[in-house]
Image (tube, rainbow, N blue to C red):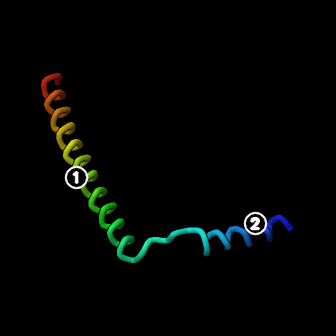
Amino acid sequence: MKIISYFKESYNELVNKVSWPTWKELQSSALVVMTASLLIALVVAVMDFGFRNLMEQIYKLLY
């Protein structure tokens, strides 16, 4: 019977106590996450390109 009580309490909390974001807030948050993800991906790509070129130059000096 503890499992049934757990599900009833969980449902009650999700319906009555959780404050869900509005559709506008959700869209705004999603836009922030997508923008930050693209910015981080761009930074990582630039770093990768730079390190690759640096390592190529070092290898050319050694071999």
- Determine the secondary structure under disc 1: helix
Task: In the rendered structure, find residue 6 and report the number of the disc placed on it.
Answer: 2
Q: Is residue 29 left or right of residue 4?
A: left
Q: Is residue 27 left or right of residue 5?
A: left
Q: Are marks 2 and 1 in contact (CB under 8 Å)?
A: no
| Residue type highlighted by circle 1 | Leu
Q: Position of residue 54 (x, y in %)?
A: 16, 33
Q: Position of residue 43 (x, y in %)?
A: 23, 47
Q: Residue at x 30, y 66 (%)?
A: 31
Mark 2 to mark 1 CA distance (whole Å)? 45 Å
Badge 2: residue crowd in 10 Å (few <14, some 14–19, many ≥20):
few
Q: Which residue position holds label 1? A: 42
| Residue type highlighted by circle 2 | Tyr
* Dot 2 or dot 1, earlier in sequence: 2
Q: Is residue 26 left or right of residue 7?
A: left
Q: Position of residue 40 (x, y in %)?
A: 27, 51
- Determine the secondary structure under disc 2: helix
Disc 2 versus disc 1: nearer the observer: 2
